Every structure is written in C-alpha cells, then in structure tokens.
Image (cartoon, helix red, strand yellow):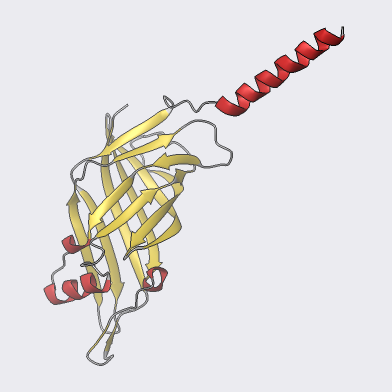
Amino acid sequence: MFYKRTYTCFGLLIAMALTSIFGVKKDVSATTRMVVTQGGLLKVTGSTNISNFCYSISNYNNPDTITIYRYNSKNDMLPMNGSLNFNVNSFSSDNNFMTNEFRKTLKSLQYPTLTVSFLSINKVPELKPEPENVSGWITVTVAGVTKKYLVNYTFTSINAGMIKIDGAKTLSFSDFNLEAPKKFGGMIRTKETLDIAFQLYLKIIN
C-alpha cells in the first residue's frame, strides 16, 4: 500500500511538473492576421496662438502585419502584435517652413521613425459594414521616447477580406520630453497638445 501511494504521488508530481513546464499552450491558430495595404494616413493637427496647422503622412503602405490573438486572456484585453513605422521626414503640409520646423521639433535627424505598436484590444471586431467601436492599448515612440495610451478605434468592413481602421488620440509634446515650438522671440507659440488621427486599410490574411 505504501509503494502504491508513493507511485501515485510520484505520478501526480510528474504530471504537475509537465504542466508547469509546458503549460496550457496558446492556440496560435486562433488568430486574426491583417496586413496593411495602400492608402493609410497619419494626421497631426494642432494650433498656435495665431493659427491652426495640420501635418500628414499620406498613402502609408508599408506591408506591416497586425495580429489579434483570440485565445483566453487573463484580463479583458486580447493580446495584439504589430507595429507601424512612419518616416518623420515624410510629414508634409502646405507650409514647407512650418513642416521643417515640426520635423526638427521631433528630432527627425536623430530619430527619423515614429512608431505605433499595438498591444491589446478589448474584443475581436465582427467586421460588419457598419462601423464597430473597439478600444485597445498602444505605444507611441517619438524622438526615442515611448509612451503607452488607451485608444478608441472604429473597424469597418469595406468588402470581403478588407477592413478600414480609424483611430484618434490627443498627445502632448511633453509626453516625449519635447518642447512646443516658439518662433520670433515667442511671438508665435505652439500649444502643448496635438491631435493624432490615423486611418489604415488592411487585408485579412487568415
């Protein structure tokens, strides 16, 4: 009887050890994978004490892949993976002088890439023709500084296998240890906050 109990306990320990080592594997097949297609847009709007401004990067088409993992999560958010990498020197506007100043403010020579990384989302969109509201966490990296934000999106199904994502967030220069630009001895002062909006077109690839 003693040996039988010993073997039983030993078997349970082995099972626990194997479970600890291998765990409950994530079902990597339970994913939604999307690749960025042509037509994306990043827009930054703000204002000075005398006027408004808008800088944009249009027709973003880097073939970045964004993945939503649909396996059970420990919290209400589903993990995501994928990043968008925007060339800061691609920002344009109808005022070349102000655009160049904006690029300098973002330290484009030292940090030429603005990166948006997707971390999580609160649900898998149903991808219907009607816009669907979702939210999720992202990080934004500007001038070598990374900040985390909760962002609201709308997912809209355009046609079979194609979707459009719209998102927006208000950021501040100080979030990234940047100083809002001033010109002509402070006569023209840029306000601290910036409104960031992006639009992406993606193709579902699984």
Which of 146/181 is in front?
A: 146
Residue visible at 40% across and 73% down in the picture:
174
- Where is residue 195 shown, x and y percent of the image? 34, 65
Q: Quadrant of the C terminus?
A: top left
Which of 172/117 is in front?
A: 117
- Where is residue 67 shown, x and y percent of the image? 37, 37
**Image position of 59 with respect to 79: above or below:** below
- Where is residue 75 shown, x and y percent of the image? 58, 41
Which of 89/195 is in front?
A: 89
Total tally of numbered discs in the picture: 0
Let me know if residue 134 appears in the view.
yes
Q: Quadrant of the N terminus?
A: top right
Let me know if residue 23 appears in the view.
no
Residue visible at 18% across and 63% down in the picture:
89
In this rendering, position of residue 62 left or right of residue 180: left
Residue visible at 29% across and 76% down in the picture:
47
- Where is residue 155 shown, x and y percent of the image? 36, 42
**Image position of 140 with respect to 110: above or below:** above
User: Seen from this angle, which residue lies furthest front?
Assistant: 3
In this rendering, position of residue 82 left or right of residue 8: left
Residue visible at 28% across and 90% down in the picture:
186
The answer to which quarter of the image holds residue 157 is top left
